[in-house]
Image (spheres, grey):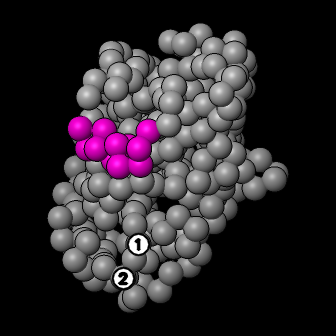
């Protein structure tokens, strides 16, 4: 077996920033267990597998493909940064001739289109509902101790818990916050929560760019301690912060160690455009 494989840094224009994803192009169907073995071997937060939907399709001319995402531990229903990486491989390395690509996924059809300064993903927008703090108090305190919390929301569609920190905190506090992810799967083992979003209201621009909100994302339940930049989390964050700020267009920063910027625009039809840059840092052949 020989598969073309790429590593792409997503939601950044610079190599070694943003969120890296592996992307494999499948000319033929893989045995089910091989997907997970490859993802474990790549050992990145996500490995994406692009497959042809019909025997006559090809990666240069066709505009619709199947797409699956795997962490080193299991398959996931949605991954924004690996979708961005997949589109970048097709547009920039394979030279796909189309301006818009459609991916058939576990989360339905997702579209990626070329933009002047990156790629725009069309993702579902997931609402987050008020969550009783006491029901998730053990999880939150295990993760962030006595850090002051301003709001807690839950997204049942994505099983993500959104925790907004107090507006008294600045970006540097969130960046430097020590989060205990190791114990979270033991504290929350009901299956209700599969991802923890910590978020903070943005600050006015000064010497640094102005952002509407900041975030960090943790998913130890699926084998990812901290994800550097997370498109799927922003499908939840966009809904929340749009309501809080009264804005449809927002500029977000995920302040992990690698960091990443996202330009967000909400649709009237309950979807969201998320724009980001990419940098292809590796290409080769996977042999087994």
Q: Secondary structure at mark 1?
A: loop
Coordinates of residue 79 in the picture (x, y in percent): 49, 46
The one of 90 and 136 positioned closer to us in this rendering = 90
- Rate crowding at label 1 as few (under 14), some (14 to 19) or many (20 or more) other CA atoms within 10 Å: many
What predominant SS class does the magenta segment belong to?
helix
Which x, y percent locates residue 232? 52, 51
Q: Identify which residue is drawn at 22% across, 63% down.
A: 181
Q: Which of the numbered marks, if any, corresponds to residue 179? A: none
Find out whether the residues at labels 2 and 1 contact each other: C-beta distance under 8 Å. yes
User: Which of the pair 274/148 is nearer the observer?
Assistant: 274
Furthest-bottom residue in this view: 134
Q: Does 232 sit above or below residue 52?
A: below
Residue 191: % across, % down? 39, 77
**How many neighbours does mark 2 have within 10 angstroms: few (below 14), some (14-19), or many (20 or more)?**
few
| Label of residue 193 in the image | 1
What segment is highlighted magenta in the picture? 30-41
- As helix, strand or loop, the secondary structure at mark 2 comes to loop
Is residue 209 in view from this perspective?
Answer: no
- Residue at 58% over, 68% down: 157
Q: Farthest residue toward the right?
A: 268
């Amino acid at each position: 077996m020989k598969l073309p494989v790429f590593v792409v840094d997503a939601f950044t224009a610079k190599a070694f920033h943003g969120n890296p994803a592996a992307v494999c192009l499948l000319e033929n169907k893989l045995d089910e267990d091989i997907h997970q073995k490859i993802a474990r071997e790549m050992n990145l937060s996500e490995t994406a597998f692009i497959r042809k939907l019909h025997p006559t399709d090809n990666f240069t001319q066709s505009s619709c493909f199947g797409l699956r995402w795997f962490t080193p531990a299991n398959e996931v229903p949605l991954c924004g940064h690996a979708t961005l990486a997949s589109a970048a491989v097709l547009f920039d390395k394979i030279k796909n001739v189309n301006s818009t690509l459609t991916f058939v996924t576990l989360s339905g059809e997702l579209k990626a289109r070329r933009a002047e300064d990156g790629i725009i993903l069309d993702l579902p927008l997931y609402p987050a509902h008020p969550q009783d703090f006491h029901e998730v108090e053990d999880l939150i305190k295990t993760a962030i101790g006595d850090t002051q919390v301003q709001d807690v929301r839950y997204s049942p569609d994505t099983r993500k818990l959104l925790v907004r920190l107090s507006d008294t905190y600045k970006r540097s506090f969130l960046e430097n916050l020590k989060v205990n992810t190791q114990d979270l799967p033991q504290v929350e083992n009901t299956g209700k929560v599969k991802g923890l979003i910590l978020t903070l209201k943005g600050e006015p621009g000064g010497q640094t760019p102005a952002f509407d909100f900041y975030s960090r994302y943790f998913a130890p339940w699926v084998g990812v301690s901290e994800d550097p930049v997370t498109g799927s989390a922003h499908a939840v964050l966009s809904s929340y912060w749009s309501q809080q700020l009264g804005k449809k267009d927002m500029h977000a920063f995920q302040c992990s160690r690698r960091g990443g910027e996202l330009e967000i625009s909400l649709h009237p039809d309950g979807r969201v455009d998320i724009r980001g840059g990419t940098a292809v840092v590796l290409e080769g052949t996977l042999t087994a």
